[in-house]
Image (cartoon, rainbow, N blue to C red):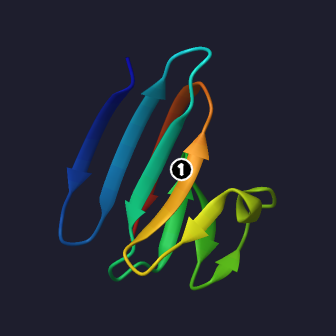
Amino acid sequence: MIETRFNNSSENFELEVTVPETTSALVKLPRKNLTSIFYGGQLIWRDGLWLKKGFEKRVVFSEVAAQLEVSAGKWMFKVR
């Protein structure tokens, strides 16, 4: 079973996703007022620029969300 936890405040949206072995998950992060995306505490995207290689091929932006598929494991995201 995929497990999620999140915290939504006026400044940040934090999401923790645990994906079991042999499974993947589609994660959608809110796009409203999006200025940066952190993965595991590391800044990977800010104001339209990728700061960590590899993620640019995995994230699709729409008007309402940044969407990416993640493999098995524990993923932690923070959006500002």
- Foreground pick, 48 / 9: 48
| Rendered position, 58 above or below 40 | below
- The extreme right residue here reads 53
37 vs 56, left or right, is: left
Residue 76 percent across, percent down from the top left: 47, 42
29 vs 8, left or right, is: right
51 vs 71, left or right, is: right
Residue 10 percent across, percent down from the top left: 18, 71
* Residue at the image position 59 percent from the left and 67 percent from the top: 60
| Rendered position, 49 above or below 78 | below
All told, the count of numbered labels is 1
Q: Amino acid at mark 1?
A: Gly
Residue under numbered circle 1: 41
Q: Quadrant of the C terminus?
A: bottom left
* Residue at the image position 53 percent from the left and 50 percent from the top: 41
Q: Quadrant of the N terminus?
A: top left
